[in-house]
Amino acid sequence: MKSYAPRTPSRRHMTNVSYAGLSRVEPDKLLTERLKSHAGRNSQGRITTRHQGGGEKKLYRKIDFKQEKLQSAVLETLEYDPYRTAFIAKMLYPDGERRYIVAPHGVKVGAVLTVAENAPLEIGNRLKLKNIPVGAQVHNVELQPARGGQMARSAGSYLEVLANDGKYTDLKMGSGEVRRVLSECYASIGQVSNPEWNLTVIGKAGRSRWLGIRPTVRGSVMNPVDHPYGGGEGRTQRGTRKPKTLWGKVTGGRKTRDPKKRSNKVIVKRRSKK
């Protein structure tokens, strides 16, 4: 982690991830596109996700989550991606094509990563779950064959292979949940890069605005008409038996998962309660 000299009150506790190991290159123009910022609004212009808007302009990097080219490729550069917490790697294939992938933790520029059904068990290589031994860490895991990686794609995340049983593989998630996935699905060996990302201290309100995060107002300081917690003289109690959202919906301690959801049958063990 990178810390700063306390020249101002906001700098005193500010920390950031060190980018010393990244390549000093511009993003590949053929692999980027400009996405329109909607500031948390839907197609009707109504805010559906609060506290979003503003921020620096940024280019979206097209990430290859499928990695369907079953061959080896050279890791050409390690780069920062403003749209995700993990670092990304630009891969150069023998036919001259270049693609971005989510960078595994510990790989360096010049490494050769292989995608094959029985690829060597080395960090960054991608192979089928049925060929990965018990106890290995994997990331960018498919939920359905040929659909592309959908699990364990954020900074520092990984899944642990618990068992290979017939056509299914049991995976332990970071929350403690154990989920069953088809053994024909592909997964990459190792942990996602940038595991120190969760130690970042933003430090000041202005830096949140650079990231496109708008201010959040506590419900207890609002008026009764604006929030269930609002009103009262001075600092008052919540006033409702159960915690509620701005719209009066009960939150905290209430199950929200659909009991008829199809994926319930592949969950071997639920995540542990805190």
Image (cartoon, rainbow, N blue to C red):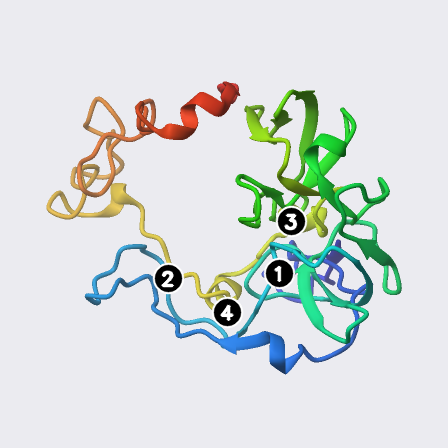
Quadrant of the rendered image containing residue 91: bottom right
Which is more N-terminal, label 4 or label 1? 1
Where 35 sits versus 216, above or below? below
Helix, strand or loop status at disc 4: helix
Write down the residue under mark 3.
Answer: 155
Q: Which residue sits at x=22%, y=43%?
A: 246
Write down the residue under mark 4.
Answer: 210
Helix, strand or loop status at disc 1: loop
Helix, strand or loop status at disc 3: loop
**Residue 240 screen position, x and y as percent:** 19, 26
Q: Amino acid at mark 2?
A: Gln
Where 33 sits versus 169, above or below? below
Measure the C-alpha gap from mark 1 to mark 2: 27 Å
Q: Which residue sits at x=27%, y=55%?
A: 48
Measure the C-alpha gap from mark 1 to mark 4: 27 Å
Measure the C-alpha gap from mark 3 to mark 2: 22 Å
Q: Residues within 10 Å of mark 4 (few under 14, many from 20)?
A: some
Measure the C-alpha gap from mark 1 to mark 3: 16 Å
Which is more N-terminal, label 2 or label 1? 2
Measure the C-alpha gap from mark 3 to mark 4: 20 Å
